[in-house]
Amino acid sequence: MAGIIEKTTVGHGNPFKVNWWVRFAWAAAFLYVIYAANYLDVSWVRFIGGLSNGADFLGEMVPVNFSRWKLLVGNLVETVEIAVIASAFGIVFSLPIGLLAARNMMPPWITWPARVFIALCRSFHPVIFAILFVKAVGFGPLAGILTLIFASIGFIGKLFAEAIEEISLKPVEALRASGAPFISIIMYAVVPQVQNRFIGFSSYQFDANLRNSTMVGIVGAGGIGGTLFAAFQRFDYDFLAAILISIIGLVMVSECISLQIKKVFQ
Amino acid sequence: MMSDQNNPVGTHAKRSLKIENLVKEYVPGKPILNGISFEVKGTSSVAIIGASGTGKSTLIRCVNKLIPPTSGNVYVSGENITKLTGKELRRARRKIGMVFQEFNLVERLSVMENVLCGRLGYVAPWRAWMRKYQTEDIDLAFELLESIGLVDFAHQRADSLSGGQRQRVGIARAIMQEPHVLLADEPTSSLDPKTSVEIMELLLGLSESHSLPLLINIHDVELAKRYTGRVIGLANGGIVYDGSPAGLSNENLKEIYGGASWLE
Amino acid sequence: MSEIIATHKWERFTFRERMARFAVFLGFAIALSLSISTVEVIPEFLYDAPTQAADLLVRMWPMDFAYYPQGIHEAMLETLHIASLGTLLAIVMAVPVGIMAANNIVHFSPLNWLAKLILVSSRSVNSLVWALLFVAIFGPGPLAGTVCIGFRSVGFVGKLFAEALEETNPGPVEALTAAGAPWFSVFLKGYWPQVAPAFWGIFLFRWDINVRESAVIGLVGAGGIGMVLDTALNLFYWDRVSVILLSIFAVVILAELLVTYIRKRII
């Protein structure tokens, strides 16, 4: 080390310091890739072998088969319904929970339970919730709705709590000094500061719910996922392509709509 | 003006702020304020001066219990604030208008909404949410905006205003409460000298026209001398000067701010 | 003074603003009521849900901790490797696509749009769907899982990377271009130093997400702990299910703590 310092400070040899940490990190990453690939039995041969399978797979997808469009539309509608209901309840529940979890507005004995609840909702992937709800309430959209409500609380609740924790407390102080009741303080001094971000989170979560509601069906929780899974299992790849295209289309439409909604509230 | 009609001259005599033996300790055994007592009555204005960190802001926040005092009493128009909690404290706070150093407006709301914030202590939360204020409140708000020259800005968002304009809105919000006393915490510290003078004149004028006792934290000694009728100097947790601005000598200032070289 | 007052009326929003807001709320209300009235939910199942959930919890207890060394540990390591390797794969793919999507670097809009299409498709298709796809191509196992995590993450990483690139200060880039530096040097010395912190932040953030995702893609056969969970669920070994869920929870929390720690230290 002493040699390096001497060289760069006295000798004017290389004006750029060699960052040994970065080089070491790159070497470690490279070694890790080799080790992990071995561990997982991921090899180039298998990958190349898979590519030809993939080509066959893609080949079977065309021409896309929209002949069962009635089933497709019915499923898409159910997917949207699941997303709408779950978003509505999820957003409504996460408002108070996010507020309760904000450490600058609430005492610790309230924020702790709220934060633990949010952490629980976040830690498990929605699919795991979906499996448990399918076991609890049976197959069908109800399990999907319950799943996505919990997922929404985990996501928006956390972001909302963080947004509230970042607000300026000056107006809050001013309204407390004027004798305003707590609810009025929230509405006048807190909500205006977080409203736009909250609408952003909510519309993002609606998109996420729409995407996830295509997924929860795979484990039987309603929506288009069930049909998608069935198409996979029956090697019905041309119908599968139709389903995938409609899902992507649906998500894009909803992203456009939420963009418009955000404009209205700006 | 509106508030004068609501408060006939007879009640004005009772308007007062009395602080009695006030003590505040953030760390037990190390009081930042130690036995402060004084009284402000009628339309008199009092400036509190002192070096940074001597507890001027703490003192003014102990008056409306934004910071609860460790011991002592604060009486606003005869009512003891320090004993109150919850709803009663909120009701008492309505009688205490407060103006802040950094204005403390809700930046994303309009000027009008910010002024109406002064009525939140009187209006039920759901009415406040629906913005269903009584006509008298809205009229009073317009009247105040007229008097501070910002009526054309009523619909603009508060964050589009200049510093001086924002402080005017902050003052209008405080007057909107129809207070019995007015507190101002370094109201000119974030403003340029010219605007500072305008804000001081506005505060003093309102104190006069609404018969409000006025308590101002200020570090600009010249402004304090020029506008207020009485100066209280704080140092080491106690009052070291209480008297007319004219009587404030260099000796006093040395005691308040420490050192002497800055006076020359 | 009353004359002046009479001419003032105060309203919070203009008519148009109010109508737009009203339309959004109305639209959402209609969508919600239509959804609730047509979705096929059997109310009895909803009322029954707490009892059933309680029953599940009872059957999960006591946990079969002895199963952890037998079946969970190896699968959990596999899950972590899938997440890490998949994230690295995503980065390798996301850097060129991200550069292609950044309109201040590539001044050719069809390429921008192509890149954006790739990014959107990657994000629109759910990780489980990607997993099904690659299980169909590569057969069940961690290879499918790794590729799935990689493809699924490209959209996220690429989008954020492109945004970071678009926000860079053009000053240093102009200076380098003016000095006649070749394109690769311009990128390495002009753009990269500005986006590197964001880039590593995105990498860590996505790795954290991928730990969660790789824990479930096994449910459709793409390797890792999810396959063990699937087996336990199918065989109704609820005491094992609870241990698996607890291990996933622990790993996810540890991953999040690790990421938070590294972000604080490095970035």
Image (cartoon, coloured by chain):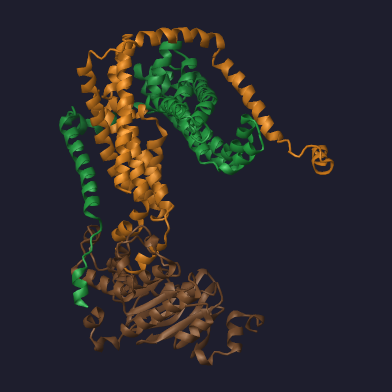
Measured from the top left, where is residue A196 in percent x and y?
35, 48
Against A223, residue A85 (above or below) is below
Chain A representation colour: orange
Q: Left or right of A176: which side holds C104?
A: right
Q: Quadrant of residue B157?
A: bottom left
Q: Left or right of B4: which side holds B96?
A: right
Task: Write the residue at 63% across / 23% down.
Answer: A30
Measured from the top left, where is residue A216 in percent x and y?
32, 25
Q: Quadrant of residue C9?
A: bottom left
Against C169, residue B19 (above or below) is below
Residue C253 can be seen in this image: no
Q: Left or right of A170: which side holds C99?
A: right
Chain C representation colour: green
Task: Write the residue at 58% across / 90% down.
Answer: B249
Nearer to us in this view, B251 or B133: B133
Measured from the top left, where is residue B243 in percent x and y?
49, 90
Nearer to us in this view, C233 or C88: C88
The residue positioned farthest toward the left in the image shown: C37
Measured from the top left, where is residue B205 in percent x and y?
36, 83
Q: Quadrant of residue C134?
A: top left
Against A154, residue A61 (above or below) is above
Nearer to us in this view, B26 or A39: A39
Residue C67 can be seen in this image: yes
Task: Write the residue at 55% across / 8% down.
Answer: A45
Task: Write the residue at 35% across / 50% down.
Answer: A99
User: What count of labels does the image hold?
Assistant: 0
The residue positioned farthest toward the bottom in the image shown: B247
Q: Quadrant of the N terminus of chain A?
A: top right
Tell which chain the image draws in brown: B
